[in-house]
Image (cartoon, rainbow, N blue to C red):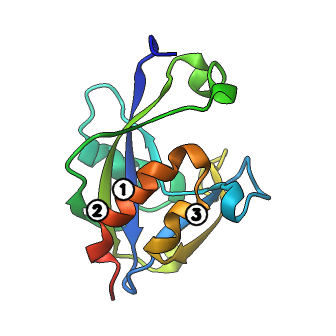
Amino acid sequence: MSDLPYRPNVGAVLFNREGLIFVARRADMPNAEGPAGGWQLPQGGIDEGEDPGVAVFRELEEEIGTRKAEIIAEHPEWLTYELPPALLGISWRGKYRGQRQRWFAMRFTGQDSDIRLDLDPHPEFDAWRWVPLSELPSLAVPFKRAIYDILADSFARFAER
């Protein structure tokens, strides 16, 4: 496992005008609630040579159907997580041991109707909602919880109206 690289990735903590954050339920985990996980932030791979700030807008559009947002902060460090043993060799065709992520706090500038999970022919998410930032870690799958704890602390100042 330690011989495999981390997959380069970006993620968005998307805040609405009320200071709530966007979370979406993975389509492959439709019954996952609470401690079971299944809810996550928009995130995705960085293409070779792509700037992370450009990648985060591309990922928003691919995953939630809109790029109506602005970057308001960037977490100062790359964050990494390891896949659990059961997913090694399966996720990302077995090429990576986990992800190395650059996270952005973003302000949503659109309307809820601008969020369209159905625009991709193979949507990653099947449901979404706005939640308080403090709830984020409890909604995540266990192997992402430590990163979500860091993000909840790092971006807490944006969780206001």
Which residue has dot 2 on it?
Answer: 154
Amino acid type at mark 3 = Ser
Residue at 68% from the left image edge and 60% from the top image edge: 35
Q: What element carries label 1?
A: helix
Q: Which of 66 and 93 is in front in this view?
A: 93
Question: On the image, numbered disc 1 is attached to which residue?
Answer: 150
Q: Which element type, helix, strand or loop, lies under badge 2?
A: helix
Viewed as shown, does residue 80 lie left or right of 35? left
Q: Which of marks 1 and 3 is nearer the N terminus?
A: 3
How far separated are the C-alphas under marks 1 and 3? Answer: 13 Å
Callout 1–callout 2 Cβ contact below 8 Å: yes
Q: Measuring 27% from the left and 42% from the top, which residue is drawn there?
A: 52
Kind of residue at disc 1: Ile
| 41 versus 159 height, above or below | above
Residue 30 percent location from the top left of the image: 77, 56
Q: Mark 3 points at which residue?
A: 138
Q: At label 2, which amino acid type do we have?
A: Ser
Would residue 117 be visible to someone looking at this image? no
Q: Residues within 10 Å of mark 1 (few under 14, many from 20)?
A: some
